[in-house]
Amino acid sequence: MSEAFDCAKCGESLYGRKYIQTDGGPHCVPCYDNTFANTCAECQQLIGHDSRELFYEDRHFHEGCFRCCRCQRSLADEPFTCQDNELLCNDCYCSAFSSQCSACGETVMPGSRKLEYGGQTWHEHCFLCSGCEQPLGSRSFVPDKGGHYCVPCYENKFAPRCARCSKTLTQGGVTYRDQPWHRECLVCTGCQTPLAGQQFTSRDDDPYCVACFGELFAPKCSSCKCPITGLGGGKYVSFEDRHWHHSCFSCARCSTSLVGQGFVPDGDQVLCQGCSQAGP
């Protein structure tokens, strides 16, 4: 009498039948599938022992069920992406979720090098300077009037130029006679002292510090012999070809201020009316 050879699950004889051996003993095919087979996440049917099974994370699929949820293309041998728990082929993912390059209009593929600015996206090789048309990459750039410029191109095209040296002003600077100047270029024509932030005046469009202007061009006070510049609200009095600071315009004898008063010239001096009438 032959030895019994039965399914470990249902107990039916396996003689002449296909079976599958497991650690728990032999199983007939139906019992094996019901006990050990995974359920397909797509069709919810068992994945039989003779079916090609694919899995992603903790989900299992029949080969024919492992498809893009949009175009139904098989993903068995294709790259894919999972988005919101749905499997997508690369083409569908790019169409739905990837950006379009603002320069060439092509899709910026996931994982590719790209640049984003102002809500727009570019392939790295498409993000070019509007001036020299060289890739900007990670270099600094300046946006202007719909274009993007590397710093040298922007400076050459748009940056103001110093009225003295004609070089571009990249930062700072001062304005003199409605023209931009480098701070270091705005100097006194006489002594070359920097004038930025200082009081100064000009002659024939050339800037001068107060000291040089007074020494070179200002009339001299007939009393103290110092220059009369009129800068800073300084007032002065002129009579014929002579000039005085307000503070210096006084009677040569009694030192009374003659500003706004009558006076009498006496040679190189001026006298108040009282001293003039008193005689020598």
Image (cartoon, grey):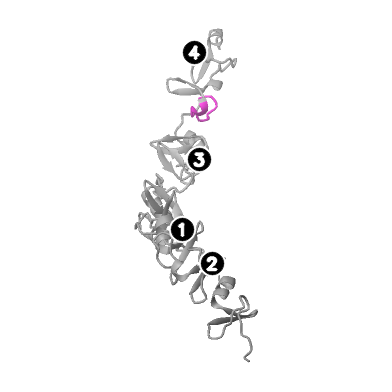
State the image coordinates of residue 201 (x, y, percent, origin top left). 46, 34
Helix, strand or loop status at disc 2: loop
Q: Residue at x 56, y 85 (%)?
A: 15
Q: Amino acid at mark 3?
A: Ala
Q: Is residue 229 magenta?
A: yes
Q: Main secondary structure of the magenta part?
A: loop
Quote the CA–CA distance across marks 2 and 3.
Answer: 82 Å
Q: Give the mark nearer the N terminus: 2 vs 1.
A: 2
Q: Position of residue 240 (x, y in %)?
A: 42, 20
Residue neighbourhood size for the residue with mark 3, other residues' Cα within 10 Å, grouped as few (<14), some (14–19), many (≥20): some
Instruction: Identify the disc placed on residue 196.
Output: 3
**Residue under circle 2?**
39
Earlier in the chain: of badge 1 and badge 3, it is 1
Q: Nearer the viewer, mark 1 or mark 4?
A: 1
Q: Which residue is mark 4?
A: 264
The range drawn in magenta is 222-232
Q: Alpha-carbon neighbours of circle 2 within 10 Å: few (<14), some, or many (≥20)?
A: some
Which comes before the other along the chain, label 1 or label 4? Answer: 1
In the shown orientation, is residue 250 left or right of residue 66?
A: right
Confirm whether the magenta stretch covers residue 184. no
Q: Are marks 2 and 3 in contact (CB under 8 Å)?
A: no
- Amino acid type, label 2: Thr
Q: SS for tag 1?
A: loop
**Image marks 2 and 1: residues in contact by CB distance under 8 Å:** no
Asked if disc 1 and disc 4 are in contact, CB closer than 8 Å, the reply is no
Mark 2 or mark 4: which comes first in sequence? 2
* Image quadrant in which the C terminus is located: top right
